[in-house]
């Protein structure tokens, strides 16, 4: 099995794991550490393998740290203002895992896609469950959706936006 086949197999396995995580988050509002933490570690390990990596190891490490730190800081700011958590740390670990696999350059588009679909999905979720705007809903599936888009079509959003400018 050559490199392209191995990389495609890794993509399929990663998508299956992410789909399972989305299912867990939708059912339990939790992203378990026993899945997210190994996902970070395996992303870093995969990107340290020459010839198979999605991004360089440096981009992977920086992305993982930055991905976690962004959501951690956002939650700290929300907690300071509202005196309660606004986002779960499972989501921060998930973003760290996605960034460990896809690198730091994927963070802006991953967060933008997840935020837009999260707003739309959140409105639908709240209406469907007849809840008010203060009711929590799982954000992990939207991060996962955005991560899968970045995994399958890297830099999709940038290409889409830049093609419309010319």
Image (spheres, rainbow, N blue to C red):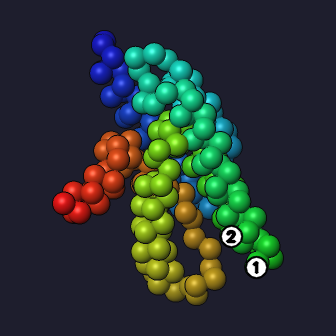
Sort mark 2 into few (<14), some (14-19) or many (20+) by Cα contacts within 10 Å. Answer: some
The quarter of the picture where residue 51 lies is: top left
Determine whether, in the image, residue 70 is placed left or right of residue 141.
Answer: right
Q: Which residue is mark 2?
A: 86
Q: Position of residue 102 (x, y in %)?
A: 47, 39
CA gap between label 1 and label 2 equals: 8 Å
Kindly state the secondary structure of the residue where label 2 is placed.
Answer: loop
Determine whether, in the image, residue 154 is placed left or right of residue 115.
Answer: left
Q: Which mark is residue 55?
A: none
Please tell me which residue is depicted at 61% across the width and 34% down the height of the picture. Answer: 61
Kindly state the secondary structure of the residue where label 1 is placed.
Answer: helix
Q: How many marks?
A: 2
The quarter of the picture where residue 82 lies is: bottom right
Q: Position of residue 144 (x, y in %)?
A: 47, 52
Q: Nearer the viewer, residue 41 or 32?
A: 41
Q: Is residue 137 visible?
A: yes
State if disc 2 and disc 1 touch (CB < 8 Å).
Answer: yes
Q: 20 above or below 80? A: above
Determine whether, in the image, residue 152 is placed left or right of residue 137.
Answer: left
Q: 31 above or below 12? A: below
Please tell me which residue is depicted at 47% across the width and 44% down the height of the picture. Answer: 105
Sort mark 1 into few (<14), some (14-19) or many (20+) by Cα contacts within 10 Å. Answer: few
Q: Which residue is mark 1?
A: 82
Please tell me which residue is depicted at 49% across the width and 17% down the height of the picture. Answer: 49
Q: Position of residue 50 (x, y in %)?
A: 45, 16
Q: Is residue 97 visible?
A: no
Q: 132 above or below 148? A: below
Q: Position of residue 155 (x, y in %)?
A: 35, 47
| Quarter of the picture holding the C terminus | bottom left
Please tell me which residue is depicted at 51% across the width and 24% down the height of the picture. Answer: 46
Residue at the front extreme, as displayed: 166
| Quarter of the picture holding the N terminus | top left
């Amino acid at each position: 099995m050559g490199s392209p086949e191995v990389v495609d197999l890794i993509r399929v396995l990663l998508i299956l794991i992410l789909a399972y995580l989305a299912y867990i988050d939708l059912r339990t509002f939790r992203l378990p550490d026993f899945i997210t933490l190994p996902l970070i570690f395996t992303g870093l390990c995969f990107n340290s393998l020459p010839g198979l990596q999605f991004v360089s190891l440096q981009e992977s490490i920086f992305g993982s740290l930055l991905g976690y730190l962004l959501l951690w800081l956002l939650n700290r700011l929300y907690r300071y203002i509202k005196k309660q958590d606004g986002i779960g740390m499972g989501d921060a670990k998930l973003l760290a895992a996605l960034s460990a696999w896809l690198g730091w350059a994927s963070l802006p588009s991953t967060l933008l896609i997840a935020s837009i679909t999260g707003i739309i999905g959140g409105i639908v979720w709240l209406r469907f469950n007849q809840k008010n705007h203060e009711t929590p809903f799982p954000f992990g599936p939207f991060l996962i959706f955005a991560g899968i888009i970045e995994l399958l079509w890297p830099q999709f959003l940038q290409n889409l936006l830049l093609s419309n400018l010319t």
